[in-house]
Amino acid sequence: MTDGTNTKAEKAAFIAAVFETMEGLIGPLHPESYIHVDDVRAEAYGYGGLTQEFRFIAAEIEAREFSARRELALSVGVR
């Protein structure tokens, strides 16, 4: 998981679902069987050669540029 993007409740639900799924696959688990969730900083991982942080920032820039272009178009009467 990307650090800071999921609530404690979401993580708890994920852990419960993984535990339940594992029991369904391999049978009863000991109550002290652990599920470990890594909260990884967005700048520390990614895919396709781009970090998650880069993807987030790029999407923010694109959204702001789109909004600015839209406002400009509306101001000159383009619909």
Image: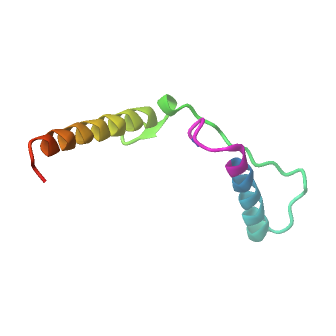
Q: Is residue 75 visible in the rendered structure shown here?
A: yes
The image shows residue 66 at horizontal and vertical percentages of 24, 42
Q: Quadrant of residue 41?
A: top right
Q: Quadrant of residue 54?
A: top left
Q: Residue at x 10, y 49 (%)?
A: 78
Whether residue 4 appears in magenta in the rendering, the answer is: yes
Q: Residue at x 79, y 66 (%)?
A: 23
Viewer-nearest residue: 22 or 67: 67
Quarter of the image that includes the N terminus: top right
Residue 41 position (above or below residue 30): above
Magenta stretch secondary structure, dominant? loop
Q: Is residue 50 visible in the rendered structure shown here?
A: no
Viewer-nearest residue: 41 or 30: 41
Quick check: 35 left or right of 46? Answer: right
Q: Quadrant of residue 30?
A: bottom right
Whether residue 35 appears in magenta in the rendering, the answer is: no
Chosen colour scheme: rainbow
The image shows residue 2 at horizontal and vertical percentages of 56, 39
Q: Residue at x 9, y 42 (%)?
A: 76
Question: Number of marks in the image?
Answer: 0
Quarter of the image that includes the C terminus: bottom left
Q: Which residues are magenta?
A: 2-10
The image shows residue 15 at horizontal and vertical percentages of 73, 53
Q: Residue at x 45, y 38 (%)?
A: 46
Residue 42 position (above or below residue 27): above
Residue 29 position (above or below residue 10): below
The image shows residue 37 at horizontal and vertical percentages of 69, 43
